[in-house]
Amino acid sequence: MEDYLPFVISGLGLGAVYALSGVGLVVLYRSSGVLNFAFGAIGALGAYVAWSLLEADWPQGLAWCAAIVASMLLSLAYGRLLAPRLSHRDPTIRSIATLGFALVVVGFTEWYWGEQPRRLVLPTDAGAIDFVLGEVEVRLTHTRALGLALAVLMMGGVGLLLSKTRVGLKMRALANDRDLSALLGIRVLGVDTVAWVLSGAFAGVCGLLLANIVRLQATLLTFLVIPAFAAAIIGRLHSLPATVAGGIAIGVLEALAITVPGFAAFRTATPFLIALAMIVFFRTGTRQA
Amino acid sequence: MSASILNDAPVQGIAAVPASLAEASRRAHISLAVMVGCVLLIGIAVPWLANAYWIKTLTSSLALSIAAAGVALLYGQLGLVSLCQYALLGAGGWIALRAGHGLGWPFELSVLAGGLLSCAVGMLAGLPALRLKGLYLALVTMMMAGGFQVVINVMGFPDGGAGWLGRVFGSERLMMPRPALALSDAAYFRYVAVWLAAMLALIELHRRTRAGRSWALIRRGEAAAVAAGVNILRYQTWAFGLAGFCAGVAGALLAGGVGQLDGRAFTAGDSVMLFALTVVGGVYHWAGALIAGLLLRAVPALLTDFGVNGYLAMIFFGVALLHALITAPSGIAGQLAGAFDAVRKRFARGGKEAGP
C-alpha cells in the first residue's frame, strides 16, 4: 500500500481537475440540455489570456480573474448568440454544434498565440504540504491542493445553488421541460445565461489548473477534458457528487496505472476504459439522453 | 352517380402507379450511373491535369471520401453520430499493413482484410447504440477514438519488422508495396477512384433496397420500425458494419498510397474533424463525401500553398459546421444540388415559354 501512496496523491491533483470539469459540464447539461464539447477550448483561451497578462506584468490575482472572466464571456457569447438558434433541435445536434465552436476557439487560440507549448507558472507551485502517512513522506504542491479544495467547494456551491435557490429551481425546471417552463413564465434566456456563465467560470478555473499541471497548449487542453466527459458519464450527466467521485477516481486510477507492468504506456487510456465500462454495465437510466 | 366518380379516380390512379414507378426506377438508375460516371471521370481527368504533388494530395482526398461516405450513411440515413470513424480507418490501415508486410497478401486482399476487420469493429462499436441513443452514442464513440489514439500511439503501424506488431527497430521502415496494377502515382489515383465509385455504388444500392427502407423507418422511430416488421438489431448493426467497412477500406488505400502510416496521426480530434467536415460537405448526397475529402486534405494543402496559417482553416471549418447545423442541414452538396436544380428549372421554363 505504501508504495502506491505517492501515485494516489499525485493522481488526486489531476482527478480534482477532471471532477471540476465534469461538474461544469453537468451543470450546463442539466439546465440547458447542451453537452459542451468546447469546454476545454474555452478554458484554454482563458489560460492564454492569463499567460499574456502575466507577460505584461499584471499582478497574479488580476490575471487569474481576467482569465476566468474571459472564459465566462466566451461561454456566454455562445450561449446567447448561437445556442438559441438550435434550441428547438434535439440534444445531440445542440451538443454536436459545440464541436464547431470548439474548432473556432482552438483555431483562433493556436493562430493568435502560436504553437510553441508553454507552461503557466502559478505562485502556488513553490509551496507544498509535506506530511507523513505511515512511513511514506508525501508531497502535495499547493496548486494541487488548491485544485482539490476548489473541486469540493465549487461542487458544494453549485449543489446548494441548484437545490436551495430560486435560480436553481428554475434551472432544474428547464432541464425537465423547456417548453413547459417557458409556459409557466420562467425567463428561459435569463436562466440559460446563468448556466452558461457558471459553466464558463468552471472552464476558466480548469483551464488555469491544467495549463499549470500539464502544459499550455490549446489542442492538448481541448482534448484533455475528454476524461471529464468520462466523469460526467459516471455521474450519468445528472449527479454532481457521482461526477466528482468519478473524476477523482479516474485521476487516481490513471496515476496508479503506472505501477501496472506492461500497462504503463497505455495508462492515458484509463478514463476511456472506465467510461466505456460504466456505459456498458450500468446503463439503466442512461437511455433517454 | 357519385359512386362512379369516386371509383373512377382511384382506378386511374392505380393505372398510373406502374408508370410512375417505372419512371422513378429509371431515374434511380440514371442517377446511379451519373454518380459512378462522375467519380470515374475525376479518376481519368485529374492525373492529366494535376502535377505530382496534387495527385498525391487528391489521392488521400479520395480515400478519405470513402470514410466520409460511411459517416454520412450513419448520420444521414439513421441520424447516428459516430465520432470514431477515423479510428476505424486507422484499424483498417493497421490490418492492411500487417497483412501486406507480414503475410505478403496481394494488395486487394489486404484492403478487403482491413475493410472486414473495421466492419467487425464498427459493428461492435454499434452494439451499445441499440440501447443508447443520440448523445450517449457520440460519447461512447468519442471514448473509443480516445482509447485508440493512446493504443496506436504506443503500438505504431507495422512497417515490415518481425513479431506480432511488425515494427522495425533500428533500420529503415519498409514501404507497403502498391498493387501491380497501379504502381505509378497517376495509376494509383485511378485505382482509388475505382474503389470510391464501387463503395459509393454499394452504399447507394443498400439505400434503395430493403436495408435503406428499414433505415428510413428506424430513423422515423423505433416503434414504427418494429410495427412494420423491421429487425432493428440486424439493420442498425448492418449500417455500422457498412460504415466501418468504408473506413477500413479508406485506411488501407491511404496506407497503400503513402506506403506507411504514422501512429501519431490518428487522434480523437481527427475523428471529430472527419465527422464535422462530412456534415459540412453534405450527408444526403454522394457529392458530399467527395467535398468532405477535399476539405480534409486538399483545402489545407491549398492554404499551405498560399502561405495561410492552417489554424485559420480550422476556424473556417468550425464556422462551416455551425452554419451547416443551424441553417443548411444538407451541407454544401445539398446547396449545390439545389442551385443546380433551380437553374435547370429556370431554363426548362424559359424554353417552354419561348417555344410555342
Image: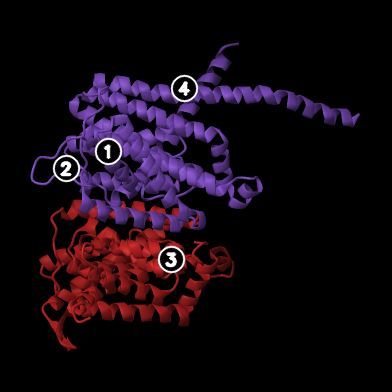
Residue highlighted by disc 2:
B161
Viewer-side residue, A96 vs B128: B128
Q: CA distance from mark 4 to mark 2?
A: 44 Å
Q: Is B292 in front, or is B162?
A: B162
Q: Colour of chain A?
A: red
Could you confirm whether marks 2 and 3 are on the same chain? no
How much space separates mark 1 and mark 2, taking CA atoms?
12 Å
Percent position of residue A197, x then y = 36, 68
Mark 1 Cα shell of 10 Å, populated few (<14), some (14-19), many (≥20): many
Q: Amino acid at mark 2?
A: Gly
* Mark 1 vs 2: CB contact within 8 A: no
Say what secondary structure mark 2 lies in: loop
Mark 4 to mark 1 CA distance (whole Å): 34 Å
Residue A61: x and y in percent read 18, 76
Residue at 25 percent of width and 18 percent of height: B48
Q: Which mark is residue B33?
A: 4
To which quarter of the image does residue B167 belong? top left
Decide if residue B2 is on the left or right side of residue A115.
Answer: right
Tell me the quarter of the image containing the N terminus of chain A.
bottom left
Chain given the colour purple: B
Question: Mark 1 sits on what residue?
Answer: B99
Chain to which the residue tagged by mark 3 belongs: A
Which circle marks residue A29 in the picture?
A: 3
Q: CA distance from mark 3 to mark 1?
A: 45 Å
Amino acid under disc 3: Tyr
